[in-house]
Image: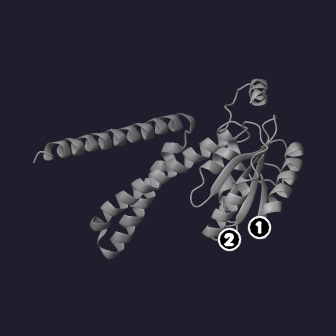
């Protein structure tokens, strides 16, 4: 009995924390919606269209079998999910559009990969904020470069040669992020990696990660994510050199 009161208080505190976290998430989503709505005039029409389409399909199917009243709640639920999905996709597209071309954008996109991926940002780089990031996944080793094409090409070749010394038979892929011919656009980077064939097992990934860790990094300090538009490149470069 003596321990019952503290346990009850702990449960109440946990419930309060859970409610507070849920409230904070709702506020963040609402703020994101308001920001996106101001920048994306087509957001609400697209969300409304997705909602009405899902409800219409459910009611239409229900009308054929004479059970539209039963399917109406299901259609509403699916409509809400469809509207939320549209919202999420348009927010993501907006974020990638703003980040595109900014130093550190590719590293940021790789950090948001879902699944079994081991990302090491900035294994090679220059004071101009060109960078090569290393990704280990089921396809093998992927070197992802971002920056000025005339500098990135040699930087990527050097890192690929250095990596090949310890990679053995593990496949090495190289990707240059950009919008020119032969490059992969930032918004398609994650999808591009997901489409690569699976060549090694999770156990081989672990072993390869340990072996490549010994190579260290040849990069200068790089920004943690896309550098804000309007940031002064010279100031950033001075900071990089000091580090």
The C terminus - image quarter: top right
For numbered disc 1, what is the local secondary structure? loop
Above/below status of 140 relative to 242 = below
Q: Secondary structure at mark 2?
A: loop
Q: Position of residue 235 (x, y in %)?
A: 75, 23
From the viewer's perspective, is 84 left or right of 72?
Answer: right
Query: Considering only vertical position in the picture, is 123 above or below 82?
Result: above
Query: Which mark, residue 171?
Result: 1
Label 1 with label 2: CB-CB less than 8 Å: yes
Report the label total: 2
First reached walking from the N terminus: tag 1 or tag 2: 1
Question: Horizontal and vertical percent for residue 87?
Answer: 50, 47
Label 2 Cα crowd, 10 Å radius (few <14 / some 14-19 / many 20+): some
At label 1, counting other C-alpha atoms closer than 10 Å, the crowd grade (few under 14, some 14-19, many 20 or more) is few
Query: How far across and how far down the image is residue 214, in percent?
Result: 73, 53
| 132 lies left or right of 78 | right
Q: Which residue: 45% across, 56% down?
A: 82
Residue sitting at x 71%, y 65%: 140
Q: Is residue 178 visible?
A: no
Can see residue 235?
yes
Q: Quadrant of residue 173?
A: bottom right
Residue 34's tag is none
In the rendered image, residue 155, in percent from the top left (x then y), is placed at 85, 47
Q: Nearer the viewer, residue 202 or 189?
A: 202
Distance between mark 1 and mark 2 Cα atoms: 9 Å
Going 82% across and 49% down the picture, which residue do you hit? 180
Return the residue nearer the eye: 13 or 85. Answer: 13
Q: Is residue 28 above or below residue 230?
A: below
What number is the disc on residue 200? 2
């Amino acid at each position: 009995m003596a321990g019952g009161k503290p346990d009850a208080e702990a449960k109440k505190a946990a419930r309060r924390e859970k409610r507070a976290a849920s409230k904070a998430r709702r506020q963040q989503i609402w703020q994101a919606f308001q920001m996106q709505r101001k920048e994306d005039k087509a957001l609400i029409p697209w969300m409304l269209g997705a909602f009405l389409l899902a409800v219409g399909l459910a009611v239409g199917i229900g009308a054929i079998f004479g059970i539209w009243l039963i399917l109406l709640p299901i259609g509403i639920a699916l409509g809400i999910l469809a509207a939320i999905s549209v919202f999420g996709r348009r927010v993501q597209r907006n974020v990638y559009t703003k980040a595109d071309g900014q130093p550190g954008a590719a590293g940021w996109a790789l950090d948001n990969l879902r699944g079994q991926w081991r990302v090491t940002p900035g294994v090679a780089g220059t004071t101009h904020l060109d960078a090569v990031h290393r990704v280990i996944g089921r396809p093998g080793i992927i070197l992802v470069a971002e920056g000025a094409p005339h500098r990135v090409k040699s930087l990527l070749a050097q890192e690929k040669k250095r990596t090949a010394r310890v990679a053995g038979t593990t496949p090495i892929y190289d990707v240059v992020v950009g919008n020119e011919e032969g490059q992969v656009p930032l918004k398609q980077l994650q999808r591009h990696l997901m489409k690569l064939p699976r060549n090694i097992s999770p156990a081989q990934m672990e072993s390869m990660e340990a072996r490549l860790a010994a190579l260290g990094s040849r990069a200068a300090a790089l920004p943690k994510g896309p550098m804000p538009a309007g940031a002064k490149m010279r100031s950033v470069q001075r900071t990089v050199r000091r580090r």
